[in-house]
């Protein structure tokens, strides 16, 4: 669809109000135009014909759903007959709306073109580097003369030399030259743990540019191709920090000439220079004068009283900004001490760690400063620092610090604060901390040197036990009746407490990258059981939309189970992997994994597992429109769940059967299944199951014409989903409520609810949900006489439904298109789409087939 401009959903409240006022002014112009001219009002179709825009775009401009871009706005007000004075006033109002723009804009088929602003904060007291900054400025104007190559700059240099500081500082200076946004990614090329793989990096970059997680391709080459498409013709800056080498970076390069890539690395990236035309900027330590200036900026005026000591301090830090900043922090922490005394301490080589001393190597100078900083910390805090070097994730919280150091939360918080003051860790978010990769490597080496093997293993065991206990506690709050009851070790460390589902979900969201990293590390480092157990306790949360992370975590679990010869563990991992592939609409892969899981569950005699695998196969068949096959699978699942005493699986199977009967139009049978599921879910405290059952009952009532009852049950379901923080259920309830209000001749309320649902399904990458919502909006448009708009909406819904191969939304879209074309007197197209709808509904054995046949008969009688 052709919908350029700023969507009202991406404006703040004041912007939405101003946009509504502006749209009313445009409609007033349109009404005045109709009174002045005898040939009637400019209809949406007529405006579309005159401008070449889509009817939907015209409608959104005139109803206040979208702010037109400036060029279109000028054309529109001129067509509507605005006077020059009116044009000026309206242009001012349009500019006021644009000032309230939040970030993204909508582009094509309901997808967002996000403008990312990912740069880290600018560097405090940035000093020097004038030549390098000028070189980077010049590179923007030294692109390939043919305009075919992306501008690539590679900033190389030793650890701690200030590569990231230079890149981030320049990026902030140049941000205005990249109107389509700035991407930032730390590739962790020299972290003690695993560098970020190109596949993971591409997934993060795609998500940052607005690609829904469910649409991110699985393969690296496919991700790279999609990434190049996303960045095509967009003027963006891509800052790739801490790259490990050319092969890590090359897949992350845009394909066109509109973007600039800035890379930092300790590696010279010679291959990138030779093959990809990168311009290399080698970064040396700060010259003495600039090092002294930086110390003066950081320490303050007293440096003027001891110029010799400041010069010596700059020399001992080898001109490395990281070392200079740590040294300055130490000096600032003791304002009464002469700088000369601090210099003497650092100069005393007896206090350096011999294993880190490498003569005149600048790296050794940095570690000397680190060791100097550590010597002034209490012993427990220094130990916490070195044990944090064992943490496999990109960041950590005080619970992780407490587990690693085997201290209570109060002590852990105090030690992290002390480490932050010494610049040995830095706050990442309000409750989380991170470490510079050089500091992480230093801490890990200290742990290897000063902790025994037994001590290091005990620290990591405490951390992994904490992960399992905390995830288990969060899942118990989110899904108390719906997780595998695997034994979870009792941790010796403090575990977070979660007051409500929102708190549990927030913790899981913040912790997710660390948990995924820990699962892979545990598998490769002697804790395969942790990888399996984490997969088992976290699977339901990951099913809520984190599909790529689910593929990683459950993939680790599968490997662990295979190495251990554990059939049950393999089956759990396979069924979870199948669920992720199903959510990504990779139906063949999903079917293969479900079938492999079923085979293993049968081998081990796990009835609950067999029930889940069969139910999932049934869901897959229903998604493909094969109701008979789906019902067979789910009846088998129901019998096994009942035999095995699996109340949750039993309730879910009942709902699955009810959903199939709903699609077939057997409403009495459907509501009976759903009421049984509601009662069973209530008995076991399965709140999500209760909400889902109410939702499904409301859907049956809606389809059988009991609209007031449907509204009541759907509102109850909506309230429960919101309390549980379940966005998928919330979107479904809003969508069905919108359809109910359309049937109750209240299309305004319908559109309000459907727009709220659309916002959620776009955010959650729910492609099938998008097709349902668009069909609902199309039906609301038809009910208000906007048949041309209904055409656009149903066409978009149909495209999505065909793309992901789901049949009922296809049938519904064809029916909507048939009705809209009939209202517009295009009877041939009306018959074509209604005939397709009839075929689809008959394949689904749905009662809607009779309604479509009635519409076709009415057309044929004309």
Image (tube, rainbow, N blue to C red):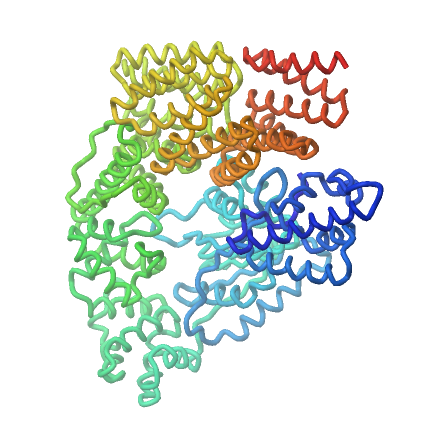
- Residue 720 spot, x, y in % from top left: 35, 33
Q: Residue at x 35, y 56 (%)?
A: 429
Is 46 above or below relative to 295? above
In this figure, what is the number of numbered marks? 0
- Res 506 visible: yes
- Is 694 positioned to the left or the right of 247 in the image? left
* Outermost residue toward the right in this view: 38
Q: Quadrant of the N terminus?
A: top right
* Outermost residue toward the front in this view: 35
- Is 759 positioned to the left or the right of 59 in the image? left
Q: Residue at x 42, y 67 (%)?
A: 161
- Residue 291 spot, x, y in % from top left: 40, 78
Is 538 above or below relative to 438? above
Closer-to-camera residue (732/268)? 732
Is 759 above or below relative to 354? above
Q: Quadrant of the C terminus?
A: top right
Closer-to-camera residue (632/604)? 632
Closer-to-camera residue (156/505)? 505
- Res 216 visible: no
- Is 737 positioned to the left or the right of 416 in the image? right
- Residue 207 spot, x, y in % from top left: 50, 44
* Outermost residue toward the bottom in this view: 305
- Residue 675 spot, x, y in % from top left: 35, 17
Closer-to-camera residue (857/68)? 857
- Is 276 positioned to the left or the right of 612 in the image? right
Residue 109 appears in which quarter of the rendering?
top right
């Amino acid at each position: 669809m052709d919908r350029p401009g700023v969507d009202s959903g991406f404006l703040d409240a004041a912007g939405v109000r101003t946009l509504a006022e502006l749209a009313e002014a445009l409609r007033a112009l349109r009404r005045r135009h109709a009174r002045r001219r005898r040939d009637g009002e400019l209809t949406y179709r007529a405006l579309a014909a005159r401008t070449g825009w889509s009817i939907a775009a015209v409608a959104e401009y005139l109803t206040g759903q979208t702010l037109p871009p400036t060029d279109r706005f000028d054309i529109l007000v001129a067509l509507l007959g605005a006077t020059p004075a009116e044009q000026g006033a309206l242009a001012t109002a349009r500019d006021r709306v644009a000032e309230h723009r939040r970030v993204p804009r909508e582009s094509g088929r309901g997808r967002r073109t996000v403008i990312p602003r990912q740069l880290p904060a600018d560097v405090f007291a940035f000093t020097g580097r004038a030549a390098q900054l000028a070189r980077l400025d010049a590179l923007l104007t030294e692109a390939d003369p043919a305009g075919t190559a992306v501008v690539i700059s590679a900033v190389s240099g030793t650890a701690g030399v200030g590569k990231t500081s230079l890149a981030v500082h320049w990026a902030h200076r140049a941000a205005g030259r990249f109107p389509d946004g700035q991407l930032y990614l730390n590739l962790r090329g020299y972290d003690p743990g695993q560098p970020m793989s190109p596949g993971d990096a591409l997934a993060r970059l795609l998500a940052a540019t607005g690609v829904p997680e469910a649409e991110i391709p699985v393969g690296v080459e496919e991700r790279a191709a999609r990434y190049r498409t996303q960045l095509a013709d967009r003027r963006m800056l891509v800052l790739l920090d801490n790259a490990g080498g050319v092969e890590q970076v090359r897949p992350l390069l845009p394909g066109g000439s509109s973007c600039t890539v800035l890379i930092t690395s300790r590696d010279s990236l010679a291959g990138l220079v030779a093959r990809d035309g990168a311009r290399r900027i080698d970064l040396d330590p700060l010259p003495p004068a600039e090092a002294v200036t930086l110390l003066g900026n950081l320490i303050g005026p007293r440096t003027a009283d001891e110029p010799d000591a400041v010069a010596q301090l700059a020399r001992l830090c080898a001109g490395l900004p990281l070392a200079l900043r740590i040294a300055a922090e130490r000096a600032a922490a003791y304002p009464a001490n002469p700088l000369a005394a601090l210099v003497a301490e650092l100069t005393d080589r007896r206090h350096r760690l011999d294993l880190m001393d490498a003569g005149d190597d600048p790296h050794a100078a940095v570690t000397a400063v680190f060791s100097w900083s550590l010597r002034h910390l209490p012993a427990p805090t220094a130990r916490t620092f070195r044990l944090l070097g064992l943490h496999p994730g990109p960041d950590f919280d005080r619970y992780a610090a407490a587990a690693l150091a085997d201290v209570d939360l109060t002590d852990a918080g105090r030690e992290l604060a002390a480490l932050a003051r010494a610049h040995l860790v830095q706050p990442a978010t309000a409750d989380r901390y991170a470490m510079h990769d050089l500091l992480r490597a230093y801490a890990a080496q200290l742990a290897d040197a000063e902790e025994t093997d037994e001590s290091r293993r005990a620290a990591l065991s405490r951390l992994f036990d904490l992960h399992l206990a905390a995830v288990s506690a969060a899942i118990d709050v989110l899904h108390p009746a719906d997780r595998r009851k695997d034994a979870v070790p009792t941790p010796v460390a403090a575990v977070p407490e979660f007051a409500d589902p929102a708190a549990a979900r927030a913790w899981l969201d913040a912790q997710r990258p660390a948990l995924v990293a820990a699962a892979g590390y545990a598998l490769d480092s002697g804790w395969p059981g942790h990888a399996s157990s984490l997969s088992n306790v976290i699977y339901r949360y990951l099913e809520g939309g984190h599909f790529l992370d689910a593929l990683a975590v459950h993939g680790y679990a599968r490997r662990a189970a295979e190495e251990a010869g554990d059939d049950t563990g393999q089956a759990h991992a396979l069924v979870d992997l199948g669920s992720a592939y199903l959510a990504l609409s990779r139906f063949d892969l999903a079917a293969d994994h479900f079938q492999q899981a079923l085979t293993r569950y049968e081998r081990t005699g796990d009835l609950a597992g067999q029930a889940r695998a069969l139910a999932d196969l049934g869901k897959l068949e229903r998604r493909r429109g094969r109701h008979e096959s789906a019902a067979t699978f789910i009846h088998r699942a129901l019998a096994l769940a009942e035999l095995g005493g699996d109340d949750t699986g039993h309730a879910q199977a009942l709902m699955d059967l009810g959903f199939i009967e709903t699609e077939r139009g057997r409403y009495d049978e459907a509501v009976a299944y759903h009421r049984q599921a509601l009662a069973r879910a209530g008995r076991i405290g399965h709140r999500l199951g209760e909400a889902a059952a109410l939702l499904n009952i409301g859907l049956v009532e809606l389809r059988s014409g009991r609209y007031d009852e449907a509204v009541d049950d759907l509102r109850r379901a909506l309230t429960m989903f919101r309390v549980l923080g379940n966005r998928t259920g919330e979107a479904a309830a809003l969508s069905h409520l919108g359809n109910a209000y359309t049937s109750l001749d209240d299309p305004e309320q319908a559109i309000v609810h459907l727009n709220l649902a659309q916002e959620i399904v776009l955010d959650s990458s729910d492609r099938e949900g998008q097709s349902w919502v668009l069909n609902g909006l199309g039906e609301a448009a038809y009910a208000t006489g906007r048949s041309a708009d209904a055409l656009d909406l149903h066409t978009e819904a149909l495209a999505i439904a065909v793309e992901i191969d789901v049949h009922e939304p296809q049938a519904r879209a064809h029916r909507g298109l048939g009705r809209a074309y009939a209202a517009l007197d295009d009877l041939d197209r009306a018959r074509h789409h209604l005939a397709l709808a009839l075929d689809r509904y008959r394949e689904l054995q749905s009662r809607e087939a009779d309604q479509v046949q009635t519409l076709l008969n009415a057309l044929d009688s004309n």
